[in-house]
Image: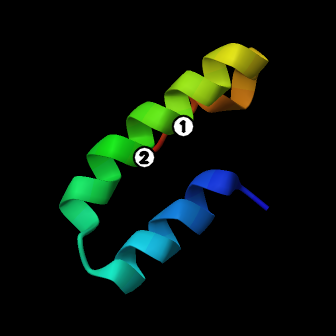
Amino acid sequence: MPLQHSYKLLCSIVKQADFCSEVLDEMFLYLCNIRINQQCKKKKV
């Protein structure tokens, strides 16, 4: 289960997609950098 998708689903429910996308993408990339996960580089834009 990709964590990012869960966040985006949550955000769409909250109906603040633009704000959530920016903040959560940053958070996601930050977490990815910590975990040094190669898949994180394949972020969908």
Count of marks, rendered view = 2
Judged from this view, the residue extending furthest toward the front is: 14
Q: Is residue 6 above or below residue 19?
A: below
Question: What is the secondary structure assignment of the residue under circle 2?
Answer: helix
Rendered residue at 63%/28% (across/down): 31
Amino acid type at mark 2: Leu
Say whether marks 2 and 1 touch (CB < 8 Å): yes
**Observer-nearest of 17 and 42:** 17
Figure quadrant of residue 33:
top right
Which sits in the foreground, 41 or 11? 11
Disc 1, SS: helix
Alpha-carbon distance for marks 2 and 1? 6 Å
Left or right of 10: which side holds 21?
Answer: left
Q: Looking at the rendering, which quadrant does residue 23 occupy? A: top left
Name the quarter where the C terminus is drawn. top left
Is 13 placed left or right of 4 in the picture? left
Mark 1 surroundings within 10 Å by alpha-carbon count, few (fewer than 14), some (14 through 19), many (20 or more): some
Residue 20 in the image: state x and y as whole percent.
32, 57
Q: Position of residue 18 (x, y in %)?
A: 20, 59
**Residue of label 1:** 28
Q: Position of residue 2 (x, y in %)?
A: 71, 55
Asked where in the image residue 3 lies, by quadrant, the reply is bottom right
Q: Position of residue 19 (x, y in %)?
A: 22, 55
Q: Does the rendering let one see residue 41?
A: no
Amino acid type, mark 1: Phe
Which quadrant of the rendered structure holds the N terminus? bottom right
Q: Relative to residue 17, is residue 37 depicted above or below?
A: above
Residue bearing mark 2: 24
